[in-house]
Image (tube, rainbow, N blue to C red):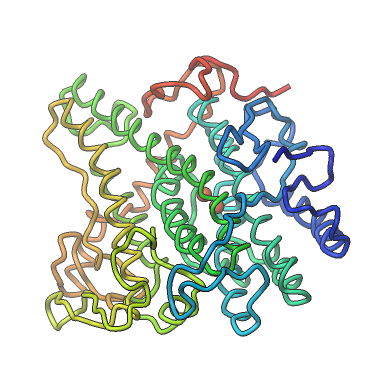
Amino acid sequence: MTIDYNERIPNNVDLQNDRRLLRALEKWQPAFLRWWDEMGPVGAKECHAYLRTAIGADASGWAHFDHVRMADYRWGIFLAAPEADRRIGFGEHKGEPAWQELPGEYRSELRRLIVIQGDTEPASVEQQRRLGQSCPSLYDLRNLYQVNVEEGRHLWAMVYLLQAYFGRDGREEADAMLERHAGHPDRPRILQAFNEKTDDWLSFFMFTFFQDRDGKFQLSALAESGFDPLCRTCRFMLTEEAHHMFVGESGVFRIVERSCELMREHDTDDVRAHGGIDLATIQRFINFHFSICLDLFGQEQSTNAANYYSQGLKGRFHEAKIDDDHRLIDSVSVIRVLEHASIGTREVPALTAVNEQLRTNYIEDSRRGIGRFNKIIKAYGIDVELRLPHPAFHRKVGNFAGAHVTPEGEVVGEAEWDGRRALWLPSVEDYAFVRSLMRPVTEPGKMAGWIAPPKRGIHGQPPDFQYVRFD
Ligand SMILES: [Fe+2]
Ligand SMILES: [Fe+2]
């Protein structure tokens, strides 16, 4: 289905034939645009960025590339095509037809799930809003803007569900999405990882590597939902999320590559003097972002998560590929627990541990990415390995909240942990150093000195293509 960009709100949900919903969304639109103006990317308005835009939501070529004036960007509502006779794939309702209307008995649970997901989308735009002013290249600036406009669209996706299916309280939740702000002292975003600062590009690439990967897993679990509109919304969002993770993974990769290059060139581990980011600092950023993202998956054992699963609202990653009863009636899972001075395990009903299972899937996926960084380090003949810290390290949610665990998984005393903190997590000096490297590079084909150029351009364009124009 082709999308008509002449409409005020481009969509593939037949909005023009639902006057009530159209009016509600048209009322919300100016508030969204105001928010984008005040909280969106600084200095972007008059830029023309070479962006990918959705022109249809089916698998065959949904994307269109062109220079778009940022102020003219059109956010729309796109759902993946419906699957004929789709059935609920798990929980108590397994095998029943998927719900096309909101199941009244699960109204508050679904609203909660949609609000939590929706809140992360504008949060990331707010967190990244100043990065354009210190872009390492036009290629990277374009990628930042692409991620930003799509996160804005993800907010539209969740607001569409709220407005279309939840009536008055849906409208109130939609308004509240624009009232909470990342890092605001009184009205912060719901999840802590979305209140952290993202003021430098190393943090941005870590964010798109780790936080957007959390997005992939949360959206995948929601894409299993028995509530079909939620499933179809998330399926389309996942196609965009894949690009965000590409930006993160290739970004960190290029920083690591440049550091290795400088290490060989100057025969030193300490590349700071040569304008690079040392691998030890990169490791500390990994430790920070990974640990705050693990918190996003919630408690190891959770009654809420068990209910969402049983009710058919939120499934597991690739539910259909898992070989079990998809009800988790008698099965067990193993979770990690803190036992005095060490970390042990405990067997619990699998139904209560679906959060932990999703977190485990996330860890495996993250590890594959880290493996790619290590390949390039090895290719340079450098004897260093980047690693994910132990899952109990630096946690604020769940069984290890407040525990003092090293990146190797050793439980230590508070004083020892505090004493070694600067070895494990970015310090004020680390942030100051990384920020000192952040100078804008806006000449086509030029690249900041702390990052290697990308292997290839966007959509077949050459590296020195004018990915962003400032006219
Ligand atoms: Fe998103
Ligand atoms: Fe994303």
Residue 292 lies, with reference to residue 101, above or below; the image says: above
Q: Quick check: 167 left or right of 352?
A: right
Rendering quarter of residue 184: bottom right
Counting from the top left corner in percent of width and height, residue 141 is at 55, 32
Rendering quarter of residue 45: top right
**Which quadrant of the rendered structure holds the N terminus?**
top right
**Which quadrant of the rendered structure holds the C terminus?**
top right
Counting from the top left corner in percent of width and height, residue 410 is at 13, 67
Q: Residue at (23%, 41%) from the top-left corner?
A: 371
Q: Quick check: 120 left or right of 450?
A: right
Q: Quick check: 78 left or right of 189?
A: right
Front in this rendered view, residue 433 or 334 = 334
Counting from the top left corner in percent of width and height, residue 165 is at 71, 70
Counting from the top left corner in percent of width and height, residue 378 is at 16, 31
Q: Residue at (42%, 41%) from the top-left corner?
A: 248
Q: Residue at (56%, 42%) from the top-left corner?
A: 147
Front in this rendered view, residue 455 or 417 = 455
Residue 403 lies, with reference to residue 198, above or below; the image says: below
Residue 6 lies, with reference to residue 425, above or below; the image says: above
Residue 91 lies, with reference to residue 11, above or below; the image says: below
Q: Residue at (14%, 77%) from the top-left corner?
A: 344
